[in-house]
Image (cartoon, rainbow, N blue to C red):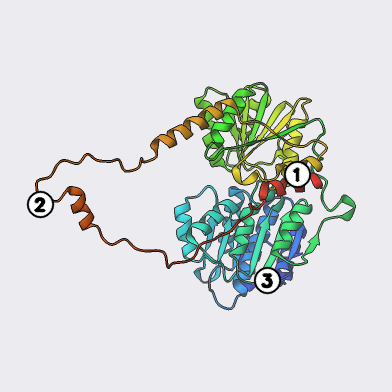
Amino acid sequence: MKYSELNLNDHTLEALNKANIDEASSLQQTLISKTVEKQSIVVNADPGDDKNTAFAIAAVEHVQQREEPEGTAVLIITDKAEVAEEICSSIEALGLPNDETVACISNNGSAEKQAEQMEQSPSVIVANPERLQDLLQEHRFIFRHISLLVLDELKHILSNGQAENLKKIKRRVLSDYTTLVCCTSFDEDVKKMVSSFTDEPTTIGFDDSSNNGQQHAPQPVADHLTQGYINVPPRMKISTLTAHIEQTPSGSCVIFTASKRGTDRLYRVLKKRGLKATSLHRKLSDEKREQRFSNFANSDVQFLLVSDISGNDLDLNNVTQVINYDVPNTSDEYRFRAALAAKNKSGRIVSLVSKQDRSDINVLQNELGQTPEEIPLPEEAKKKLKQREKKNSQNKSPSRSKRKKRPSRPGQKSSDQKSDEMQLPQPRYDKLSGGRSGNHKEETNGFVKFFKKLFSS
């Protein structure tokens, strides 16, 4: 089909003609026609230029259609920095009307400059979810005029632990909008996230006979896999990790973190301790990623630190231990990580659990054939905890010590008397009220709910 048959704006058609782009692919026809008609859709679409060009055309159309050029009209959220940059380039090539602008909020750019761009209310924003949420939270931006919201490669976004960021971004969109979702799998996690953005979207390209695109759904956690968790004292996560891996030194270990920053920090810590480690994340070039992956797969290094990459994307057979430095947001991702260790007969998966995630872990005993068991805090971590507690107790300011009073001459006021006379009247609070009183039950939170969902499904 020719673009001229898609009922596009004259400005868009003119830009396509100048670029010698005449015919639309079937995917482009679907994405553009539905979004121009303001129909929310979920489309089975592989990554590629066809999809990115369709996003650009749909974005320009929505900017053209609005009555008044006010605020951001289009928000496109995609998983990779390079994809965000490609979509922005396509939009700039088409050109927005009336000197309106597009902002690329990618993980590769300067956060300070990106904040300045967003303060100018660009007509289109193409963003990576983590960076966008950081800026929204820091600068309290609100979207009041979005007419098109795109979630690109949604399954990858969720697999990389960005579900919570998406939810927070959604809360800052206060307008009615058309939703366009592209992904290669329409499993339960994707369905749940889609439902929070739009009601009853049209699904395209997912065949019921293929289990709604769930060909790559994770397998249940293997019975032979040892599962455990360590209760981590406050501000002792790194100490607990290093003590644990030094206490269990044998074999290859994959450590998952929630961010590249966390991975970089752990790499420096392990290197300082003389441990061989390497890291993987999406900002690496293909060449570096393959080299580091090969170093671990060939056992040249013992520890592989991973952020923003799903366990499902790691084809490894030699892993003896998987450590969740940060517990994953979805049960699917936990299963993918568990499967890495399950390939080894003596494999194990261990999660580091902070204080807020400890409640009622014993409820899992009745829900699992093999329950994650609590692993005692490593001895080295116990020593550090005792040293810290001792130091804290010594640093506490002692009560006011009694001073020796020098005898004063007759009629001379002591220094204490002078001090008391110079004191301002102290405020009284006996007539004020407020605050909370009574007993408050501790609320069961994310970790238990996560494991309940994981093993009850």
Q: Secondary structure at mark 2?
A: loop
Q: Secondary structure at mark 1?
A: helix
Q: Which mark is residue 330?
A: none
- Image position, residue 121 (x, y; %): 50, 66
Q: CA distance from mark 3 to mark 2?
A: 98 Å
Mark before the other along the chain sequence, 3 or 1: 3
Q: Nearer the viewer, residue 8 or 23?
A: 8
Q: Please give left or right for residue 40 compared with residue 95 in the image.
A: right
Determine which residue is flagged by label 2.
Answer: 411
- Image position, residue 16 (x, y; %): 64, 64
Q: Nearer the viewer, mark 1 or mark 2?
A: 2
Q: Nearer the viewer, residue 169 or 213?
A: 169
Q: Secondary structure at mark 3?
A: loop
Determine which residue is flagged by label 3.
Answer: 8
Is residue 282 depicted above or below 279 in this figure? below
Mark before the other along the chain sequence, 3 or 2: 3
